[in-house]
Amino acid sequence: MNHRRIGHPITLVPTSRGRPLVCSRMTSVIIRDMTIDDLSIVHEINEENVPAVGQETFDDLRAIHDVCTMNIVAEVDGVVRGFCMVMPPGTTYDSPNYLFFCDRYDDFVYLDRVAITAAFQGRGIGAMLYREVERRATSEWFALEVNVKPPNEGSMRFHRREGFTEVEQQETRPGKIVSLMIKPLR
């Protein structure tokens, strides 16, 4: 199993607004492969982040896990606080966003979902997960989608900072529009 301790140890102390404030060096983030035992907490984090990520039943999330080649979690103090699920082209996954990239690109990894528990958002955990995907990927492109309607402005800012650019927008169902984005890896 891959385990990587990322960054300097930090202590996270809740503020009056409920978000942690970095105070000292006692807690560390470990980026590692997701195990089947992690799926319950991963499902909880996923559901906590709806509508920024798609709502899934536990069984549907397990099916997504099974087609992904990278299922990665971020642990803080031994507790999973975030995750990402990434797949290559050519799987049986039938998401219209994934299929958009399959129809247009041969060599990519597709980030189906990334989510961080609310108390740990904005602390760099998402960027750590992305660095790990980029470190492992052998593909030319890193592909994903970001909600435009309903808007997910925080995610859009994050992905632009991370170097992703929009290639197209598509309506996946009435009232739902996504920005399809890529980032070169090679």
Image (cartoon, rainbow, N blue to C red):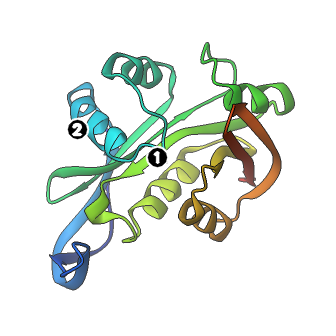
Q: Earlier in the sequence, mark 2 or mark 1?
A: 2
Q: Amino acid at mark 1?
A: Val
Residue 72 place in picture, x, y as percent: 39, 42
Can you identify the residue that label 2 sits on? Answer: 41
In the displayed structure image, the side of residue 115 where residue 5 appears, left or right: left
10 Å neighbourhood of mark 2: few (<14), some, or many (≥20)? some
Q: Is residue 71 visible?
A: yes
48 relative to 118, above or below? above
| Depth order, front residue of 124/136 | 124
10 Å neighbourhood of mark 1: few (<14), some, or many (≥20)? many
In the displayed structure image, the side of residue 89 where residue 13 appears, left or right: left
Q: CA–CA distance between discs 2 and 1?
A: 13 Å
User: At 30% across and 54% down in the image, what residue appears?
Assistant: 117
95 relative to 109, above or below? above
Which residue is the extreme one toward the front? 175
Residue 129 place in picture, x, y as percent: 45, 54
Residue 36 place in picture, x, y as percent: 26, 25
127 relative to 135, above or below? below
User: At 26% across and 73% down in the image, what residue appears?
Assistant: 19
Q: Quadrant of residue 141?
A: top right
Q: Amino acid at mark 2?
A: Ile
Residue 69 is tagged as none
Residue 114 is tagged as 1
Residue 86 place in picture, x, y as percent: 53, 36
Disc 2 on helix, strand or loop?
Answer: helix
